[in-house]
Image (tube, grey):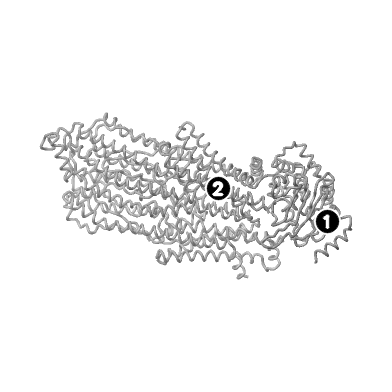
Amino acid sequence: MINIQQAHKAFKGKPAVQNLTLQVEQGEILGLLGANGAGKSTTINMLLGFLKPDSGTISVLEKDINQSSKELRKHIGYIPENVNLYPYLSGLENLDYFCRLSGLKYTKSELQEFLNICGLPSEDHQQKVAEYSKGMRQKVGIAIAYAKKAKVYLLDEPASGLDPRASNELSVLLKKLASEGATILMASHDIFRVREVCHRIGILRKGELVKELRSEEVSANELEKIYLEYIQN
Amino acid sequence: MWQIIKNEWLYLRRTRMLVGLSIGFVMVFLFSIILGNYQNQKELKASETAKKHLREQWESIEAMNPHSAAHYGTYVFKPSNLLSSLDEGVSSVTGNMLRVEGHVQNEMVHSEASQMQAISRFGKLKSSLLLKFIVPLLLIFLAFNAVSSEKQSGRLKLLVLQGASPIRIVLAKTVAVWLYGVLLLALVVATYSLLNIQNLSGDTLFRSLMVFVSYALYYFIITGLTVFFSARWQNSTVALTSMLGIWMFWSVFLPSVLLSSVEKWHPLPSRNEFKAAMREDRSKGIDGHNPADERGKELEKEVMAEYGVDSLYKLPINYDGIRMQADEEYGNQVWDKHFGNMRTVFTQQKQSMQIAGLFNPFISLQNASMGFAATDNMHHQEFLLQVETYRREFIKILNDKHAYGGSKTGDWGWKANNEFYKSVPDFDYQPTALGAIFHHYLLDVGLLLLWFILTLSLLFYGTRKMQLV
Amino acid sequence: MYKYMFKQFLRTNTCKLGLFLVLILGVISISIGKQFLKGQERIGSHVTEKQLEHIQRNVELHSEDIGLLLYYLKFAVISEVSPLAALSIGQKDVNPSVQSVSILTLEGQKYDSDLVNPTKLLFGNLDLSFILLYVFPLLIIAFTFSLKSEEEETGTWRLVRIMSKSRLQFLLAKLSVRVILLLLAMCILFVLAGLILSIPFGMAFLAFFVTGLLYILFWFSLSFWIISLKRNSSFNALALLSIWLTLVVLLPATINNFVVTKYPVPEAFTTNIKQRDGYHQKWDTNKRETMEKFYARYPQFESYGYPPEEGFNWLWYYAMQYLGDEESSKESEMMRTKILQREQMSRKWGQFIPSIHTQLAFNDLANTSLSNHMYYLQYLNDFHEQTRLYFYPKIFSNVNGKEVDWSQFTPGYFSLSSKVNFRQIFLPLIILILIFFGLSLLNMRRESRVY
């Protein structure tokens, strides 16, 4: 579903992503671990088609993202680290607005259903987003992706800044989405959360994928050890 | 795109500061409209009363020598039209009353500006001040972070992911803010029309429409540029500062500097020089009170030959009237020459200013706004010409009466009766129809359109490769 | 500390661009002033040159009939234009500094304005006073609106709080860097203006300079007060710009409106109409009545007696001309009073609105205010009367035009040596500066107690 082959990307001569090859299958959750500046966000931006790789190919749903970005974007959901919505609209209105932008018209009860699925309690639907917590906004962000029936979810540091309960709810939700057939890639530096949620884990260092492993192969403590080892080298 | 525009409006409606600002602004607008309308009505009434009073005085002349009546003269008033309260143009600096009498062409006196302390560079609080200077500023405030705020918050990525292309976002944002300006504009024009509904004519409507179009174009240029800067630069403060700079430069500095330069390229004589030159030219002609020099003698001979007499006193008519009319006509030629020169200079100055619109759409807006409101210098000169035409007609009637009314040469005591004075026509100002002079403003509207297209293409091509990350 | 503050600020684009812009605009404004001054000089010398020629030519033509000669002769009165006027053109572009009047009825002659493209008057002049009043405040806003908030938003404020002994001192130091730079720019402009326009260094120039300085300090204190409210950058920017808009654009315009509505001058045209009624109805009334009124005012001429009722006569003609002025004098005086009332009203309000106050002070110092023009008109009245009284006996006894000593009729010259009232000019500004500065200090104090 997600296929990155030999991708290179440099900013002003400084490489951000080098020689990156990566696949994510349908129903799979891949976690990208890496320090700040390891190239996680660049990878996601390339997958979104916002950045073009200097060389290599990036395809989503078997199609090259740079050739059919418009069509592919319909199937991609993106949840940034900080989901910023329009503070003067309610959660429901935000969802409605973003759906309408992609040409989808849902009834109010359908929209509420989406929010409920993504874990936003009904009593909060009508509140202004200005009063939402970070976790609540993230749920609306996922609902936006869910409402357009995204086949691919890209998450950038989704767990940072969430309280443990919200973080846990997110894990449950992501697993559910994957079990329904979504392809999920999440970038993070939260080793424990990644091991818990993801099926597979990749470690990035200076833009290079230095290690790939399956999460059931290691315990959280072992993963931390491996991570630190690779990062330091 | 419609979705984005709707959302922008929701933002305006739900942000308390903006709602407050808009309400305050509309209040100031309504206040200025009502005040302007009130002052306009008062002025109209005062000049109408004065006009009536003067005509009554004229018609009540029982018996008077026609030449005395020519000295007695009359006054004409420049009536303010409906649109002059929208943009009063040059009328605050030109005055609105002109004395009509024999021998001389007078100038307008008592401009409002000469009786005021120069405390405000922007004149009085009036709709045109708000429309020309303040509304653009408001649009800049509303638009300067239109795109950069989306970018800084990261919503821009989400928008694009949802299928809204960058160009659509930028255009929609521009249109949303622009519509806000247009709405204010419509409010002003509509309020004026409602206040004066009984005086609306086809020409006035045409003119208001053109005023509306000119401002709408200018607002689009300002909004579009602001949104463009907002999209190009990460930092919204830079967008704000540069737009404020452009605003200042366009609407305050350049007009002033350009007008000074234009005046240097096409200089006008000073009042004293102008008058002295007229006097000089005229003194070469025959003197209205003194039949002593050459032209006078020639005319004498001519007239005596025509009637076959050897002395002016034997003429069956009054030679003084003929002589004064001849002098009048000579003076008219002198006036035509000098006034014509002045008009040429004015036209050159105007043309230079129009071309300056190439660098500064504000100048085009200013030209168009005053022109369509019938308050620019060209309309003013047109009025002066009409008055002069009337003056010639008026004086000719009086001189002819003096000559052929039944008196003899030298008979200054002879008097024409009341009936005659009643029959002299009053000045009736014919407002210039826009259709007849529309071509003078084609360049201004054209340049505004050019800037409009330029802004649009900037938005199209400049933001196509907008940095999303 | 200062060294780094200067370095830091001088490196910002805002600073470079701002200083560059204000210097360029300042130089442009000075050259516009120079152009204006040159124009005025040209007019003045042209008048002096032409006046003798004009008199001589007419004397040649009409020396036999001195009544007719004086019907044509015009005498110019020049109002002095001080070099300072180039810095603050004020009313001088609307009201000309030269008027030529004949000894006929004065009323219709004294309100002539200069020949200019009226469009130009609409925009006003871009003189140095404009730069000081409008552009400097904008720069001050751009330089200071994020004085404190930029440190907060970039996160350096916490460091500053820990490292510096006094936060207030730190901010004051930052502020003074900006004050010093802008005042330096202003000094450069004044030195340039002094050299280019060869303005004599005297009380008026000094007062002009100090007024500008105080006005700039006022804006700094206002800006500092907004900063002391401790809001974010965009709030500061918006608040300061709104204040700028209100103080320099909206309020002066509103006060203009208010003053015009409160003191309407319908006398402007009633005066003219009265004057017309005054003298032209006399054309038909009996001459004795006219002469009686004239002699009541000028009994010294009573010996010239009463002309016959029939026919034309200069004695009666000039008496009638004079009565035209007499007739409209009440309206003329009323108009004068109203204009002076307008002036006083704007001054009264101006005390509280620094932009108006400073503009008026500049105009006063440069002798370009409306009141200066009113004094000039007063002088014109006196000049007119003196000239009339000189010629009346000559006309009434029909002296030959060649016997008059014409060489003394060079143009009249009006110059107003105004005393500078320092207290009146400086005090309102100083009080406002102290108020805003005091308020800011209070705010800063209060804040430090909370932390």
Residue for badge 2: B455
Residue B96: percent from the left, percent from the top? 38, 42
Mark carried by residue C299: none
Image mark 1: chain: A
Give above or below for B307 relative to C16: above
Q: Element under label 2?
A: helix
Q: Quadrant of the C terminus of chain C?
A: bottom right
Q: Residue at x 26, y 56 (%)?
A: C50
Q: Do callouts 2 and 1 point to residues on the same chain?
A: no
Locate the N terminus of chain C and report the quarter of the image it occupies: bottom right
| Amino acid, disc 2 | Thr
Determine the image quadrant of residue C155. bottom right
Image point 70% across, 63% down: which residue? C158
Total marks placed: 2
On the rendered structure, is C227 left or right of C284?
Answer: right
Which residue is disc 1 drawn over?
A: A201
